[in-house]
Image: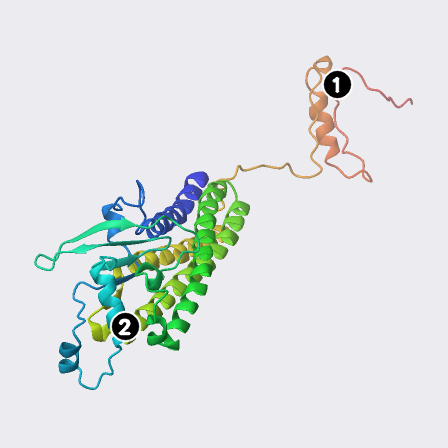
Amino acid sequence: MGKVGRFACILTPMLLTLSSLICFIIVMLGQTPWKGNNAPTTALGRDLYFFKADTSNMRLDPKLISSELPNLELDFDLINALQGSASSKQLKDFYQVGLFSYCEGDKDNSTGKETITYCSARKFQFHFDPMAVWQLNNTNVQNVLGDKFDDGMNAYAKAAGWMNWAFVITLVLTVVEFVVGFFAIFSRWGSLVTTIISTAQTVFAVAAAATATAIYGTLTGIFKTVLEPYKIDAFMGSRMLSVLWLAVAFSIASGFFWLISVCCCSGKSSHKKMVVEKTPYTYERVASPAFGGQQGHQMQSSSQWPSSKAAPAGPSNTAYEPYRERV
């Protein structure tokens, strides 16, 4: 029952670690192309994104904007640049940003159906650059958008590099935790090593999730502040964040149960064999067949008396008397 109990104790954190690993893999597959840059991503990856910009309802008519927002100071350079990008079909209806790539596509406003037409190649330390994607780098748009937009995008680019490393390290540590966890079945030392790895994995998992939530929240705020008057909507992906923080929850829970397995469930059986020890000073001698099996019994009886006192006299049952008193 000891080994069975130990296995049951290890099974819970093993399943939690596996669940965390699956969730992190799903997060990394978001907006990732499978068969080339022009092929849409899978259905699972298509619905998972950190950030989305929707330009399908973009309005660039200065009169219409002024009528709805009379206090807004229009940036005609920005309007002209967006109109040029839209007319050249460089500006798509929506953009969805994942961890290592982004996807773009068209939207049917009458039905609301979205079709992905292009996904960028997977790239480590990836970040979404709207000016490059919309081919507005060599225009006056960057000056029009102001320092707030530039500072926010630069901070996002730097944080995205660290975030990519954090996710990769977290994934590697999760795999190592799951593999090393098998050795915890046999000893508490295995549980201790796995607990240490799980602690490091949890630290990186929390850091990666917190960084992703912060930087894409900042990116969404930048888009809303600068581009919302032109009906360019921006929002975060709730599904992606849900899967990400679920992975973190599994990581924390697995670390807790790994720690419990160090203190409990030793794996040793609770039933011990009873060992009966003889009472001290009770030496039992084997009877000798030469004396009819009586010598051992006689010597045993005599050994029970202290050496300082003589044994009581009595008739001898042996065949001869080694000492005879002569009169």
- Image spot of residue 50 (x, y percent): 31, 60
- Image spot of residue 167 (x, y percent): 43, 55
Q: Establish if 64 lies above or below 129.
A: below
Residue lying at 27% horizontally and 49% vertically, measured from the top left: 118
Mark 2 vs 1, N-terminal side: 2
Residue lying at 55% horizontally and 46% vertically, measured from the top left: 189
Q: Nearer the viewer, residue 6 or 211?
A: 211
> Which residue corresponds to mark 1?
318
Task: Please identify the residue farthest to the top as the structure is shown.
Answer: 290
> Which residue corresponds to mark 2?
78
Disc 2: CA contacts within 10 A as few (<14), some (14-19) or many (>=20): many
Residue type at the position of mark 1? Thr
Q: Nearer the viewer, residue 254 or 243?
A: 243
Q: Nearer the viewer, residue 219 or 257?
A: 219
Query: Looking at the rendering, in which quadrant would you find the C terminus?
Result: top right
Residue 202 seen by the camera: no
Residue type at the position of mark 2? Leu
Residue 253 seen by the camera: yes
Task: Please identify the residue farthest to the right as the structure is shown.
Answer: 327
